[in-house]
Amino acid sequence: MSVSSPCINVCRIDADTGYCEGCLRTLDEIAGWSAYDDETRLWVLEAVDARRAQIQRPASGVAPGARA
């Protein structure tokens, strides 16, 4: 199995978070991707999913569309 890169060719690092605005990886994760084994790549993708969920959560901590 080969785990594909989450890169979507929107390569800008957010100064506040340190994450790529396109794929939500750090510079270290982007630079190391080609050397990572599939297990490490999957770990990075799980971290990206967690970051995406955190970013999409409003300041109130209530998910969009959820009842408070």
Image (cartoon, grey):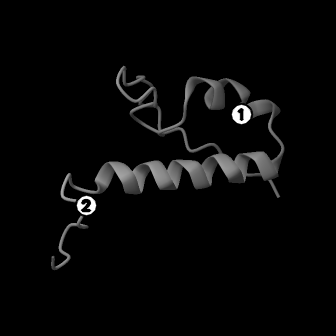
Which image quarter is the C terminus in?
A: bottom left
Residue ID at (60%, 55%): 46
Find the residue positioned furthest to the bottom. 67
Left or right of 31, for residue 15: left
Q: Residue at label 2?
A: 61
The quarter in which the N terminus is drawn is: bottom right
Q: 7 above or below 17?
A: below
Which label sits on residue 15? none
Horizontal side, residue 40 vs residue 31: left or right: right
**Mark 1: which amino acid?**
Trp
Q: Is residue 47 above or below residue 13?
A: below
C-alpha span from label 1 to label 2: 32 Å
Towards the viewer: 6 or 50: 50
Graded by Cα atoms within 10 Å as few (under 14), some (14 to 19) or many (20 or more), the crowding at tag 1 reads some
Query: As shown in the figure, which amino acid type bears the numbered disc 2?
Result: Gly
Task: Tell me the crowding category of disc 2: few under 14, some 14 to 19, or many 20 or more residues within 10 angstroms, Cα based.
Answer: few
26 in relation to 44, above or below: above
The residue that label 1 is drawn on is 33
- The total number of labels drawn is 2
Q: Is residue 51 left or right of residue 32?
A: left
The percent coordinates of residue 29 (x first, y second) are: 64, 32
Q: Look at the numbered disc 2 and give the secondary structure of its residue.
A: loop
Of residue 48 and residue 35, the one placed in the foreground of this image is 48
